[in-house]
Image (spheres, rainbow, N blue to C red):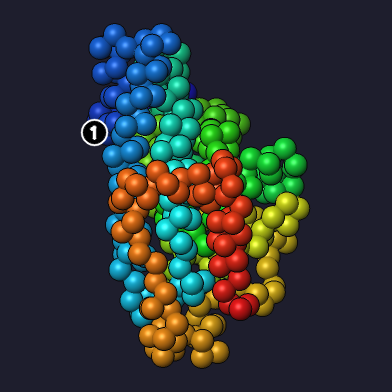
Amino acid sequence: PTDPFWPLTLRARSRGLAIDTAMVQAVCAIAEQLAASGVSGFSGCLLVWGCYTVFCYLCFSTLLIPWFLYFFGYPTYEKWRFKTNPKYPTPTAVLGEIFMGVFLANPSVTFAPSIHLALISNGTLRHHCDTPLTWQYRVYSFLMVLFVVDLYSWAWHYCGHWIGSLWKVHRHHHHFANPTPFSTIADLPPDNIIRSLYMIVVNLASYCIMGSPVDVDVLYFVTAITIGFYGMYFHCGHELSILPYDNRIFNTSYQHYVHHALSYKNKPYYTGFVFKLWDDLAGAHYHGKQCIPAVEDQKLGNRSFERWETEIRPALPDYSVLLSPSFCCQNWRHAVGLSVGPGGAAQKQSQSQSRGKAE
């Protein structure tokens, strides 16, 4: 009775101990270690939140650096041919992405997961570790997490463009009209906190279907891969030949670039994440000619080596200034996405870059 998948495993949970004990749950092991260390109460939640945030800085944020360096720090003609927007963002615009997408974002995206981990540790949600340790249940959990998280991400994002109060928060993400990987989670804290409530949404859906939560390791692993790595690809601004923009299943960096460049209040182009299904059902497609895929721009003869050498390469920004403390101190108030000080000029400059093809 405790294993909803016993028809698939061909044994009841009581007869599946050999399989169960051969698998582990890393998240639950961490929670047990926290409990053994006496971490509890409000101070315990703060400690878990702090450690989780540091972990995110060390693992997620540092992964953004090689993505940025590859596509923007060391651009080449071959890479540029597949950059949707032929122009490159200014260092000031990237500085805004770093402030919002690194320093401001990590504490907010780890807030809800930290509470979840703390509640597992103190026993309140210990039953989240009592799911069947079988490959069948983990496959079910994988499919459930992938489907529900993607639907939830689309729905919240779609509402962020239609509901006025939500748009006031989400619009800051759209200041990065010519995004780099640093803008992957460059949202204000309310947006990031609500979007990271995956453990609530997915488990509610799982309880309705199976009467039990999903595997906790699969929950965190799948969300980290989809939101983290796929999100970095989404914001890299470059198209991949192995994932054509016109494929019928998966969203690509082209769709998300169009979303950044042209979506605004009451006009949500491509708010989906992994799957195109939700935007297909909502009719949230872009059919204009202002932003076209790089591969189509190549067919028009606009990605020639001559253009690269005479127009693009001489105007490449020097992103090394981002390592200068004086540059950061002098320009952070003007950084795109930060509503502090007279930053309108920088914002308009970044938004105008999104119209590079039209120009």
Q: Secondary structure at mark 1?
A: loop
**Foreground: 274 or 304?**
304
User: As displayed, is residue 84 above or below residue 147?
Assistant: below
* Residue at 34 percent of width and 71 percent of height: 75
Query: Visible in this render: residue 44?
Result: yes
Query: Visible in this render: residue 7?
Result: no
Q: Position of residue 144 (x, y in %)?
A: 51, 42
Q: Position of residue 80 (x, y in %)?
A: 41, 76
Task: Tally the marks.
Answer: 1
* Amino acid type, residue under disc 1 in the picture: Ala
Name the side, left or right, on which 162 lies relative to 8. right
**Foreground: 168 or 223?**
168
Q: Which residue is mark 1?
A: 22
Name the side, left or right, on which 155 lies relative to 91. right
* Residue at 30 percent of width and 42 percent of height: 59
* Residue at 27 percent of width and 34 percent of height: 23
Query: In what quadrant of the picture does the C terminus appear?
Result: bottom right
User: As displayed, is residue 114 above or below residue 343?
Assistant: above
| Mark 1 closeness class: few <14, some 14–19, many ≥20 residues within 10 Å | few
Q: Quadrant of residue 125?
A: top left
Q: Position of residue 129 (x, y in %)?
A: 38, 24
* Residue at 50 percent of width and 49 percent of height: 335
Name the side, left or right, on which 297 lies relative to 107. right
Q: Quadrant of residue 99?
A: top left
Q: Position of residue 293 (x, y in %)?
A: 54, 75
